[in-house]
Structures are given as C-alpha cells and as structure tokens.
Image: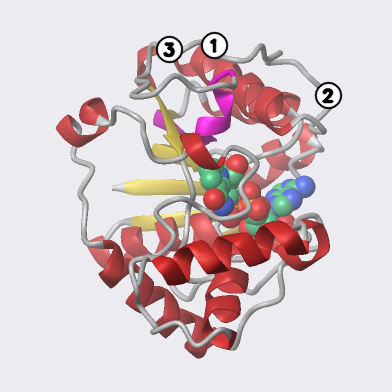
Amino acid sequence: MRVLVLGGTHHVGRAVVEVALRRGDAVTTLNRGLSRPPAPGVEALVADRTDPDAVRRALGGRSWDAVIDTWAWAPRVVADSARLLAGRAGHYGYVSSRAVYAWPWPAGADESAPLVAGDPGGQDGGDYAAAKRGGELAVAEAFGERALLARAGMILGPYEDVGRMPWWLRRLERENFPLGMEFGLRYPGDPHPTGLHDADVSAALAAGLTLRPLRETLADTWAWLRREGDPAPRPDTPSPAQWFDPVQERHVLELARSLM
Ligand SMILES: NC(=O)c1ccc[n+]([C@@H]2O[C@H](COP(=O)([O-])OP(=O)(O)OC[C@H]3O[C@@H](n4cnc5c(N)ncnc54)[C@H](OP(=O)(O)O)[C@@H]3O)[C@@H](O)[C@H]2O)c1
C-alpha cells in the first residue's frame, strides 16, 4: 500500500510511519523538515502546510492509497490538504480527538454524543476542540465516505512530546511508588478527570481496536522513556508542574497510595 503521512516525524505520526514500514507499505511523509530527521526508509517531502502552493509543488503528480493527517491547529490547513488530495488518494484518516465531544461528556457516551461546533475553513487553531472538529468537517467534505475520523482519548508512546504522562510517572517514581502499578486509569490533573475513560468504545472494538493490560502499557512507557532519555515536552504543552495545583497534586498522590 502507498501511504502518505502528513507530519510523520514525531509522536503519533512517527508511530504510524514505523508501523506502516514494518507492514511493508511504501511511505511518504510531508513536513517542514524541522522537528526531527525523517524515519529511515520513507520518501520525505518538504513543505510548509500553511502554504498550499508549496504543498501542491511538493506532492507533484504522486498518488496514494491512504493519507494520515495529524494536524491539530487551524482547520483551513486540513481543508487545503484534503482538497488537494481528494482526487489522488483513496482514503483520508484524520487523527482527531475525543475533545470534539461537548463537555460534560455523558457517562458511557458513544459516537452519537453531542459535538462542539467547528468551521472547516477556520483560520484559527487557538480553541483545540473547535479546531479538531473543523479539521474533521474539512476531511468529511473532501472525502465523504472515504474519510476516517479517529477520535482518540490520550495517546502515549515512543516519540511522545506532550510530556504529561512521563511527568506523572517520574512524579510517582519520586514518591517511591512501585513502577508499573495500575495507577493512571483516571489521568491525574486532567481538567475533566471523571470523563476520560468511561466512553462506549464498542464501535471501535468492532472495527479492530485492541486492548491490553494497563500494566503492559506502563511497562512499555517506562522502556521508551529510558530509551529516549525523558524527552522535553514541546513549548505549547507546559508540564503539569507549571499548572497543577500542589494541594490537588498531594491529594492525588495520597489517594493513589491509599489504593496500593
Ligand atoms: N497526545 C494526545 O494525548 C492526543 C490525544 C488525542 C488526539 N491527539 C492528536 O494527535 C495528533 C498528534 O500528532 P503528532 O504527534 O504526530 O504530531 P503533531 O504535533 O500534530 O504534528 C507534528 C508533525 O507535523 C509537522 N508539522 C508541524 N507544522 C507543520 C507545518 N506548518 N507544515 C508541515 N508540517 C508541519 C512536524 O514536522 P516539522 O516540524 O518538521 O514540520 C511533525 O512531523 C494531533 O492531531 C492531536 O490532536 C493527541
């Protein structure tokens, strides 16, 4: 399969690239070439996505079976890419977010839960939920039934650059919590802590979502944290140390200890 990953050098996009390469897919990435070097084995195209003409020139006359887009800012950028690719790509997968569901999330919510408003032509990416919803609408407009909107909760894994989960793991380590304990089902410090993991994901399970024990996920997380040497979070995602109330933090740690 020929796969185009828009982004593709770190975190989610990079993981997609590596899985696709392992499957034997022919992978093209498109980014500015600033964050990290491209994964070995990809065809690396360079363009700034905020400049549609530059993207058009970089794509040239190529075509793909599937596109994966991880854009999280102004929806207009997704709209431009989706329109450019509609006639020359089979499917367009947009890595969206559970943030597109209007808060408060009803317990056991599924795909029919109310959504935030979004503008597919929006130039502003400041409101994360609205930007992701705008991106979804832009992809749906251009690709219709050939669009996949993947509304992820929290994403963790190698090349992580958000820094929240690593921060919490290091914090627990400093408190001498046993590594790998099953803590974190509720994501401490999340502004919506009670709603994170109570969704009805049966549609995703039917489509192939697989589950594994949290203990394994935590063990893997430690493995890649050690391998990558605690990557610094990107500047637009300050670590919980900068925004998490110390009294609340202490409460969470005491609660976790009482559960041990
Ligand atoms: N972390 C979570 O818990 C979570 C949860 C739900 C959903 N999500 C979604 O997951 C996605 C995260 O994706 P990600 O980690 O792969 O990457 P990302 O941070 O969304 O994007 C980074 C990639 O895009 C490229 N890029 C950035 N600006 C660009 C520009 N102007 N033109 C061209 N390329 C540009 C970067 O390379 P260069 O800098 O070299 O250009 C890099 O390859 C987001 O859409 C987010 O909304 C995350």
Say what amino acid the circle numbered 2 marks: Gln
Direction from residue 163 to residue 144 in the image, left or right: left
Mark 3 and 1 residues: CB-CB less than 8 Å, in contact?
A: yes
Is residue 56 shown left or right of residue 148?
right
The residue tagged 2 is 123
User: CB of mark 2 within 8 Å of CB of mark 3?
Assistant: no
The stretch drawn in magenta includes residue 99: yes
Task: Say few, some or many: other residues with alpha carbon within 10 Å of mark 2 (under 14 / 14 to 19 / 20 or more).
Answer: some
Residue to which mark 1 is pinned: 141
Magenta-drawn stretch contains 126: no
Q: Nearer the viewer, residue 2 or 136?
A: 136
The answer to whether residue 11 is above or below residue 75 is below
Image position of 123 (left or right of 22): right
Count the marks: how many?
Answer: 3
Q: Nearer the viewer, residue 187 or 220?
A: 187
Picture coordinates of residue 157 (x, y %)?
45, 66
Q: Pinpoint residue 53: horizontal percent, then vertical percent.
A: 78, 34
**Left or right of 67 in this view: 233:** right
Dots 1, 2 in contact, CB < 8 A: no
Amino acid on which disc 1 is placed: Glu
Quadrant assignment, res 106:
top left
Residue under label 3: 144
Amino acid identity at mark 3: Gly
Q: Residues within 10 Å of mark 1 (few under 14, many from 20)?
A: some
